[in-house]
Image: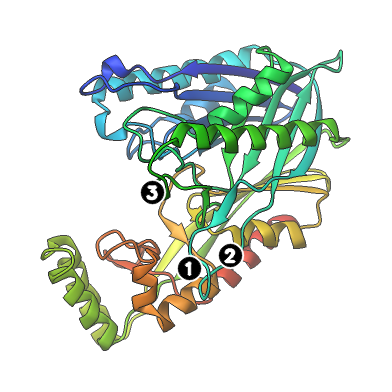
Amino acid sequence: MKVGTNVKDITHPELMRDNPVVHDPLFAKVIVYDDGDTVVAIICVDVMSLYFHEGSLGIDGPEKYKRLGIDHTFLNCTHTHSDARGSWTDAWRKNARRLIDEAVEAAYADRVPVSLHAGRAPSYIGSNRYGEPFTQVSVPWVNTLEARNENGQPIAILFEYAAHPVITIEVPEISADYPAYAVRRISDELGDSVVPMFALGCAGNCNGDPVGFSITSGWHEKAEEAGRKLGDAVLTATRNGTVLTASKFTFRTQSVMLPLRVPDQAEWEWKVGRAKTEYANDEWALKNLMVVKEIMKRGEQPMMEFQLSALTLGSEWMLVTMAAEMFSEYEVWLNAFAPFQFTMAWGYTNGRIGYIPSDLALAGSIKFPRLAAKRGLDGGVSAALNEVRSTTHEVNLPFAVGTQEILQNGIASLWEE
């Protein structure tokens, strides 16, 4: 096994509108894994959203990197809400794309022989943001995958935790939030020659604690406190890590069709009323609801195609990635049922379509729609938290109960093969 790493500072506020203040920089970090037959690039970027080919940043990723010699690319966003995305310009995006490409090329060129070590340690810096009757689950651990050189020294630590980086959300400064402080804590202990790289897990229903909205000052101090706790947990996990003996990667992917829920007449009328009153005649929402009305009349079942990907090392380690803000239930389920010694489950990877709740949350939002709205579970009419665009209709609808079972069966098929 060989590993190469590279880090680029993509902040460059001088290329943004109004030259925003930088509290701590935004980075693009890359680890390239090469087992001799399969080359995998993992890219983690300190931005809320980043897509291949389109969207808020957009990079050409997979095809370009395949020409370089990389077979599979996983692009994960740390999802910091303090990335100044409202100030991004085309010049900034172009520069960020260039730097990410340079980081991938440099990591690929700098591969050295390594051993891989997987670990896990308890970590409690997040909390479920919805609660009963919708969801109570959170992920109480941090996962690590450490690469050590032939002298046994660490050169890279990929670590994953599941909580929204929103502790600094109220600060008008650029920040990578608590992951930046976790990285700093690891670097303080191991030195700058080691690349610590944060990936966000299934954090759809969990926030870093305390969320910025709930405090009036000390945002960075609170983020530092949380980040240092997480960094300490990462160090514990690596000290107690297990060497992985499997030497070859297996990559699998699976598409599943997820059902979307069409409202009944009463719910439809309520949503129309909200769009007209609470959201000041939201034209997009009202137009969307008229399309929904036609689907209701025809009695159709809209569906959405969803991609699942998995990277495994023998029966020892499995990474599952999904292009959505997955509720933590999916990561906890994977840990409980996957036949692997170590697992990682990432949302926010290779795209971001919105939230995928658990079936309990979906059922609760049907039974208690007004409570769901009050708690923010629907995120408003035109940007509903659990509403996504159907692949069978040009319309946005929430997922239907049964989505969780379909997804879990799809994930299980990735190891049953």
Residue at mark 2: 407
Q: Is residue 289 left or right of residue 392?
A: left
Q: Position of residue 139 (x, y in %)?
A: 65, 54
* Nearer to me, 395 or 83: 83
**In the image, which is nearer the foreground, mark 3 or mark 1?**
3
Q: Residue at x 11, y 63 (%)?
A: 280
* Residue 31 placement, left or right of 284: right
Q: In the figure, 372 relative to 232: above or below?
A: below
Q: Residues within 10 Å of mark 1 (few under 14, many from 20)?
A: many
Q: Is residue 417 visible?
A: no
> Residue at the spot x=42%, y=20% of the render?
10
* Residue 258 against residue 103 in the figure, above or below: below
Quadrant hosting residue 319: top right
> What's the mark number on residue 258?
1
- Mark 3 neighbour density, 10 Å: few (under 14) some (14–19) many (20 or more): few
In the image: residue 223, left or right of residue 190: left
* Residue position marked by numbered label 3 in the rendering: 213
Residue 255 showing in the rendered view: yes
Q: CA distance from mark 3 to mark 1?
A: 33 Å
Coordinates of residue 25 in the picture (x, y in percent): 44, 21
